[in-house]
Amino acid sequence: MGQLLSFLWLSLLSICVFSSSTSAADYHEQLNLRPLPQSALLASFNFRSNTSVSEFEKGNFRFFPRSLGQILQHAGTRELHLRFSLGRWDAESWGARPWDGAREGGTGVELWAWLEADTDKEADHKWLTLTNALSGLFCASLNFIDGTRTTRPVMSFQPEGDHSTTTNMHLLYGVLPHEVVCTENLTPFLKLLPCKGKAGIASLLDGHKLFDASWQSMAIDIRPICPLDGECVLQIEQTIDMVLDIDRSKRPRDNPIPRPPAGHDLPCDTSKPYHSHDTCFPADYTAHQDWSLTQIFGKTMKGTCPLADPAVPALCLQVPESRSVFVSEGVREKKNPDRVSRCFDIPPSTHLEMVLPTPDDSASISVTPEAPLLYAERSFTGHGQERGGVQTILRNPSPDTEVEFIYMESLPWFMRIYLHTMEARVAGQSHANKSLIQQVYYRPAVDRARGTQLEVRMRVPADSTVFLTYDFEKSILRYTEYPPDANRGFDVAAAVITILDPHQERQGSVSGRFAAYTLRTTSLLCSLPTPDFSMPYNVIIFTSTAIALAFGGIFNILVRRFVAADEGPEAGLAVVLGRLKGRLMGLVKGAVKR
């Protein structure tokens, strides 16, 4: 009995020593809420944890999810970036993107990673292993990222981690623009967190609210960090950004179908000269909106995660000091010098409820979003089913600073680019300006083997708009290569625009610059020459009928036996019966004569 107690005491002591050696700064989480114009609210969830590289290689994952860590070790992955995105970021209304676009992806699923391999063939094999494993982990179709959807960017992506001790790294990039992001991807995302979705800011995440947002993006970034005066750590950062419509989020639970408000309930800007009883220009009434956490997320926040760093506030709200904010008992507000961001210290066992009432007219402050460095729009041009074109409109809002960036497109193999038609011209000028395009990397497509890769390094002068255009030819697919919804069209992945920082140089980078801002254009829907899929049905019915008629006629001729009318089965029986009757009558007559 004494030995058992000693063993239990030693076990408890070892657990306490391990817990004390686990620094609270190894994991922190934070939620930032920022009101946007037109009744929109940006909610940014950020979860970050650090794990020692030496402990990670030994199998001691600590805060790092073991399921994901084993995949990275098996596939030789040194840095990983995964994006699940849905919707469109309205830069005209909402301004600059959160995290400067670094945690944003195009519509669908994006994945890029640096793999350690000696040859390209080995890197492709590890890439296939990585995509198939992540497909099962996140319940996504990442296993469909084959050679036709994989590219090797040269200028667009740069590693965020420290890879000074790693050699022979290969960057591979894959995208699935047709992937539908849903709750099946959110559940595995939450399981990677130390507190899952049971406590902390993760308890506010609900699939019904997240996927009802106007725009949402889930990001996972894994990179090694090697400080100058410390041990290298492997950092995993999980981010969820979503733009919620306050009016739609506040609708009652018993009325799940959104209905437009009546005309007299619409908030209109009455200062417009064309305002009348039948004309309404939407007013920027975000500062006048009242909302609460329960209305926005459907529930209160369940305290804080016990493993999170208490020095990092779990919740921050970007509203002016003049705005009244009511919180649950025990929650303390921390004043920030900027007087814009207001953070709150939340006790671990407190169920947080936050209420923002409607402010007075005197205290109402309009929300002015920060303008992005560049506006980008992309669309198809031309007509017909044989050829077409792509036009990208790039607008620089800065009045005195030009923008230099890298424009990358990963196109399917059935879009054959005419590279000689690519040109860039400034709005208002009829001729192309060759000085706008500084460098071009083009990797042509191979039918049914790989897609087209196009990277263009260019610049946009201050306070100007540039049109980047090129023509392409559409290929004709085989009958079996068309999807069931072929008439809908084929999704083309969003273009990736990486704006370079003119004040910082990066050693070993092809572009020579750090990325200052990143954005994605909208995805496109390409209509290919599509056959009439009702014709095979008609042909099958016609040929089946013809074969049935021909076969039936020939079969009857070969099998049927033709006989005279009196030789048939019924006629023969009548003759036999007649003869039998004659004999019987003859016998009867003979017996009478005797």
Image (cartoon, rainbow, N blue to C red):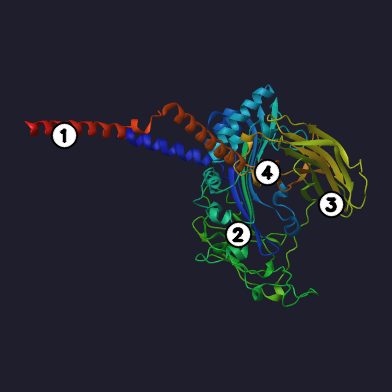
- Distance between mark 2 and mark 4 Cα atoms: 43 Å
Q: In this view, does 212 lie above or below 591?
A: below
Q: Mark 3 points at which residue?
A: 396
**N-terminal label among 2 and 4:** 2
Residue flagged by tag 3: what amino acid is it?
Asn
**N-terminal label among 4 and 3:** 3
- Distance between mark 4 and mark 3 Cα atoms: 28 Å
Where on the picture, by quarter, is residue 580? top left
Using the image as rendered, state which of residue 189 and residue 382 is in the foreground.
382
Kind of element beneath mark 3: strand
Residue 539 in percent (x, y) is at 59, 38
* Residue at the limit of the structure toward the front, as seen here: 593
Answer whether labels 4 and 3 touch (C-beta < 8 Å). Answer: no
* Residue at the limit of the structure toward the bottom, as seen here: 277
Answer whether labels 1 and 4 touch (C-beta < 8 Å). Answer: no
Kind of element beneath mark 4: strand
Residue beneath the point at 27% across and 35% down? 574
Residue 341 in percent (x, y) is at 68, 59
- Distance between mark 2 and mark 3 Cα atoms: 37 Å
Residue 67 in percent (x, y) is at 52, 36
Task: Tell me the number on the disc at residue 585.
Answer: 1
Residue flagged by tag 2: what amino acid is it?
Phe
Q: Is residue 437 above or below residue 199?
A: above
Quarter the C terminus occupies: top left
Kind of element beneath mark 2: strand
Task: Tell me the number on the disc at residue 491.
Answer: 4
- Distance between mark 1 and mark 3 Cα atoms: 121 Å
Residue flagged by tag 1: what amino acid is it?
Met
Q: Categorize mark 1 by other alpha carbons within 10 Å: few (<14), some (14-19), many (20+).
A: few
**N-terminal label among 2 and 3:** 2
Q: Categorize mark 3 by other alpha carbons within 10 Å: few (<14), some (14-19), many (20+).
A: many
